[in-house]
Amino acid sequence: MTTPNRWSDLERPPLGEAALRRAVIAPDSPWTSLDVVEATGSTNSDLAQRANAGAPEGAVLVAEEQTAGRGRLDRQWSAPPRSGLFFSVLLRPADVPVERWGWLPLLAGVATATALSRAAGVDTALKWPNDLLVTIDGEERKTGGILAERAGTDGVVIGIGINVSLRTEELPVPAAGSLALAGAKGTDRDPLLRAVLRSLADWYGEWRAAAGDPAASRLQQTYAAGCATLGREVRAELPGGRELVGTAVGVDDDGRLVLATADGEQAVGAGDVVHIRRA
C-alpha cells in the first residue's frame, strides 16, 4: 500500500475557497473577505499583521495546515494537513465598551459549539473558558479550542481550531479527540466551516446590538447552559503557580468562572481549569 503524502489523502479533500466566499460573504454578513492558504505558521499571527496594516473588520483567514498554531497559555496546536478547521477572524467592535470585549472568546465558543452540534450531529460542550469538548467512548475529549488576541487599538483576532477527521493514531495526546471519533454524521469541512461562520456572525450581531451586554444578548445564559465545567469540582491553576480548588457554580458578568471554595466564592479570570475526577 502506498502511504499518502501530505496532500494526497483522498479522504481529506481541500477546502473550496471560491464556494466558501460565495456562501459567507454577503451584504448582510460581517464577513468581508475569505482566504484559504495551504500552510502557515499561525492564522492568528498572520491576520494580526493584516489588522495592523489596516485590514477591515470581517476578514477570515483559513489554513489547510498550521505549523506553529497556538492555544491558550502558549500551548502548541498541530494536526495533519486538511484534518481540521484552522482559521481566524478579525473583529473591530468599536461600538462595544472595551471592558466587555473579554466576552468575545466565550461568544466564539458558544457559536462554534452550537454550530458543530447542529452541522456535525455531535453534542459539543464547553470547558471554561473556551475549549470544545466531545464525548468518545464515554470520556470527555478536547476537539477544539479558541484563542482571542488584541490587534492594534481597535481590533480582536479570534482563532478557532477544530479537529475534524483525526484518527486515533494521529491524536497529539490521549485527551484529544475529533468529530470523526465522536461519531460525526459527516466530516466535510466546507459545510462545517460555513455553519461556524454563520453562527459566529449571528451571535456577534446579537452581542453588538446589545452593546456587549452578556445578559441582554443571551450570551451569558447560553454559555452557562452549555458549559460542562459548571457543577463540577475543579482545580484552577492560576498565574504565579497558585492553585484554587472548588466547585464551579457560575460565570459572572465579566465572564469569570465563579468557584465555591472553603473560603467562600472566588472568581477566576485567568488560568487553567482542570476537571477533577473522583473514583
Image: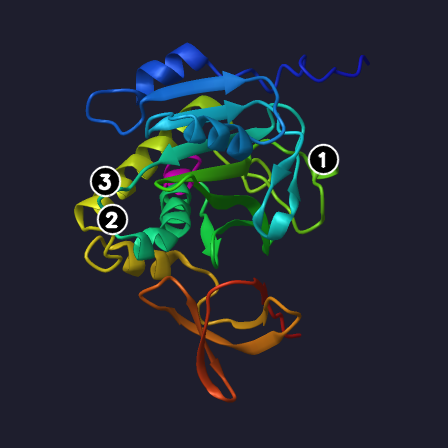
Q: Position of residue 117 (x, y in %)?
A: 40, 42
For residue 71, the mark is none
Residue type beneath disc 3: Gly
In this view, the residue in front, 78 or 173, is 78
User: Left or right: where does residue 159 sit relative to residue 40?
Assistant: left
Sequence order check, earlier mark of 3 and 2: 2
Q: How many marks?
A: 3
Say few, some or many: other residues with alpha carbon within 10 Å of mark 1 (under 14 / 14 to 19 / 20 or more): few
Residue type beneath disc 2: Val
Say few, some or many: other residues with alpha carbon within 10 Å of mark 2 (under 14 / 14 to 19 / 20 or more): some
44 relative to 2, above or below: below
Q: Position of residue 26 (x, y in %)?
A: 24, 20
In this view, the residue in front, 234 or 73, is 73
In the picture of the structure, the residue carrying the numbered disc 2 is: 96
In the picture of the structure, the residue carrying the numbered disc 1 is: 170
In the picture of the structure, the residue carrying the numbered disc 3 is: 205
Dividing the image into 4 quarters, which one contains the N terminus?
top right
Q: Main secondary structure of the magenta part?
A: helix
Residue type beneath disc 1: Glu
